[in-house]
Image (tube, grey):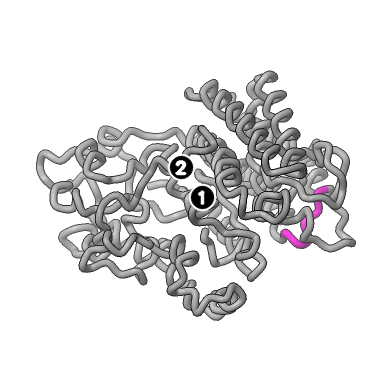
Amino acid sequence: MTEKKHKCRLHAILLLVGSLALALSSSQSFAVDVFAETHLGPATCATSQCHGKSAPYPDRNVNLNEYTIWIDGDRHSIAYQTLLSEESQRIAAKLGLENAKNATICLDCHADNAPDDKRGPKFQISDGVGCEACHGGSGQWIETHTDTDATHAKNLAAGMIATETAEVRSEVCLSCHLGTKDKFATHTIMGAGHPRLSFELDLFTANQPAHYIVDDDYVKRKGSIPSFNLWLTGQFESAKQSLNVGVQRLHDGIGMFPDFAFYDCQSCHHSLKNVRWSKRRTDGVLPGTLRLHMPNIVVLDSVARALGADDIQQTLQGEKINTIKAAQQSRQDFATAAQSMLNSLAAARDTWARKFSNTEIVAVRRALLENAAADRASDYAEAEQIYYSFESLCYTLDELDRCASTLDQLFESISDSDTFSPRSFSLLAKKLVDSF
């Protein structure tokens, strides 16, 4: 089973982000439809004859304790309960909602909010983010997925979602941990008290309790994803989805701007005594102005620098500057720049659709610190992604023990967004980089 990656640190960051996680053509909608088939609810999977055993069951291709792991230790199982808290009620009241537990904008990500006509007899909205919220409605495969001639391909054809692939997993996770055209934590929602969203696919995958084991049988049925490739795909998909949703929701904003939720929170929300502006980090925009939130690009820039892909690095950097400037000019300028950026991301991803050596992964890890040391990652969200990514790559390289002290120091430097110091983060990275 997957080893946990410094779980206490990630949980601390998640608490700072908040307990209320709503947690390549830019005009296309999601390809994954988890509501295509009827949702029967976790209770359908919960018996000891199905996935509700208390411990792994021997000599089967699945452990049959998947429901137990989810209900006992997976925070998705208590997502709905968050809506019952006093904090959630205060947020709902500020938004003019009667309560959070019945509001669609809350249920869309704090529960498996299937349409009424897609809910089976045992379905309960209070179950939170259950099995089918990720694996898709089981109405067409619940009876057949245990047949002796059942195959994963048949299950997928019947509506199961292929979360074993990096792209699909990214899309499913990001549909709440970032948002979609139809469900999104707007600046209005955040202004009412909802915390900002934060996500990194590989790290979050590892820190949820795994309800599967990637053994020979699993690989035979579903294949496997190298950890580095999962991480890299997550970076591409996060960057892509942020731009996609930004364009799709252009008319949510005020005046000429997209919704303020697409901008760096700390470009406005920090103490006036905590000066964060520097010429290097602005990409041509002036102090005191909104700066588009693009934290994954500095990570992809690190990959390009490490791999000697100067053309990709220069293209992404140029597209980033153009997109940030366009997001200060007009909605149409932003839409045009975002599409150009999406095209460049797609080209880079195609170039890097391969396996990577440990030597290359080591170089990428070092490049993350080099970018931070050069003050290229001094927006808080960028620094956070540097930390997430550095930890993911230490895990990939099986060097968590070697990295422990560095991770402690990096975590301490980003542990509080209100007191985060770009200069201190950069100086820390300079001190640490030569060790890697």
Q: Which residue is mark 2?
A: 29
Residue occupying the point 48% across, 37% down? 230
Q: Residue at x 29, y 56 (%)?
A: 66
Tell me the magenta residue range. 417-422
**Secondary structure beneath label 1:** loop
Residue 402 shows up from this direction: no
- Name the residue beneath numbered marker 1: 181
Residue 167's place in the image compared with 43, above or below, is above
Quadrant of the rendered structure where residue 87 is? bottom right
In the image, residue 418 lies in the stretch drawn in magenta: yes
In the foreground, 57 or 108: 108
Disc 2 residue type?
Ser
First along the sequence among labels 1 and 2 = 2
Q: Are marks 1 and 2 in contact (CB under 8 Å)?
A: yes
Indicate left or right for 8 with 299 as reference: left
Tell me the quarter of the picture where residue 186 sits.
Answer: bottom right
